[in-house]
Image (cartoon, coloured by chain):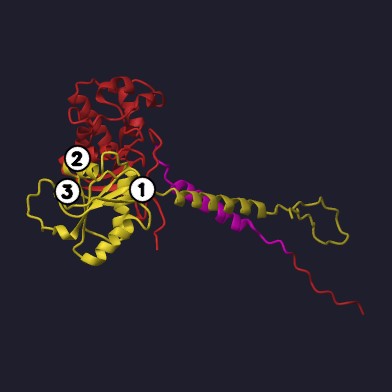
Chain colours: A yellow, B red
Amino acid sequence: MAEIDSSGGGKKGGKKRSKKMSTKIDMTPMVDLGFLLITFFMLTTTLAKPVTMQLNMPDKTDTKETSPVKLSETLTVCPDESKVYYYQGIPTEAGTVMQVTNYSETGIRKVIADLKAKVGNNFTIVIKPTKKAKYRNMIDMLDECAITNNKRYALLEIDPDTEALIKRSGK
Amino acid sequence: MPKVKAKRHSVSLDMTAMCDVAFLLLTFFMLTAKFRPEEAVTITPPSSISEKPLNTKDGMLMVSVSPEGGVYLATDDQMAREFMLERMANRYGIAVTAEMKKNFMASEIVGYPLGAMRQVLNMKPSEAKKLSKGIPIDSANNELSYWVGYAKLSNPELKVAIKGDKDSNYKVFADIIGTLQAQNINIFQLVTGPENKPK
């Protein structure tokens, strides 16, 4: 491939000239290398790009009345380290049942999707991560809200009543 | 009669132009590429299906949480950084020498309590990493609140991003959110890794 063209022109006879070397060299390997590097850099930069999810919290100084949410249209989820607790209703009431599921596709996602189908557009999710929850668990929960197409969710601190309910359920 | 030979064309063609283009592109991408911002500790963010890229147009205030729960603050706005140092040093009565300021500006990340500031800034940035254990955010001594407050004072356009390690405790995150909300910062960008959307 890498030939150096040294044809000095096909002159017959005449004066004897010093052989002229052509300056042409084969550029193919160099082009290969160039494109290889480009491909490499482009792939590595796009793969490392972080994405963000935006989290809007309510304004604490804003005292404007917000629209009330019906208890029956609300699901409270408490992400824990490896499982998710969820219940409907008020934690202090005896009739409130704490249930537990996991982060899998058939777990909390199904629970949310089923309830959303039953309740309709006003469905609200209240997220109260437990004390043991990791940051990842909260992101997973927000992700589930995005996957099931829920725009109405609130991120709250866990309250003692809910903690007591988790303890009582013994799960 | 001699045999008619098909004229043979040479298969080698001039690659110079192609080579030029390849290296031009290479140079362009390398020059426009942004370096990954330095990190005090290695943080692996959790993944989410979100597809929004990080918006760094108007400046960025990045609060990072290490797996152990240490809080670090970084900003790409040089003016805000200078302003922060000035005000923080003033507030805690630390005399800042030119050397300390140089060291402060050399590293993008703040991750030490104010008590250790003099010691950290008198060291080389590479050595000071060991002392960077995080900014205190407990309610008794919430230094993050001041750092963020001064940064916002210098450049109100700064967007707040939170980059937490996936194994960091949720409580640290809740504390950060609480601290920022007390300053009426209610919109956060949570930095996550990309993940495929389920069907």
Label 3 lies in what chain? Answer: A
Q: Position of residue B137 (x, y in %)?
A: 23, 32
Amino acid type at circle 2 is: Gly
Numbered circle sitting on residue B192: 1
Identify which residue is drawn at 66% across, 60% down. Answer: B14
SS label for mark 1: strand
Q: Position of residue A148 (x, y in %)?
A: 30, 61
Q: CA distance from mark 1 to mark 2?
A: 20 Å
Quarter of the image with the C terminus of chain A in it: top left
Label 2 lies in what chain? Answer: B
SS label for mark 2: helix
Residue B22 falls within the magenta-colored stretch? yes
The residue closer to the viewer here, A124 or B9, is A124
Q: Is residue A73 left or right of residue B3?
A: left
The residue closer to the viewer here, A7 or B89, is B89
Residue A167 falls within the magenta-colored stretch? no
From where the camera sits, is residue B35 visible? yes
Numbered circle sitting on residue A91: 3
Magenta-highlighted stretch: main secondary structure? helix
Where does the magenta region start and end?
B11-38
Vertical comparison of B40 with A151: above or below = above
Which residue, given by chain and number where applicable, does mark 2 sit on? Answer: B178
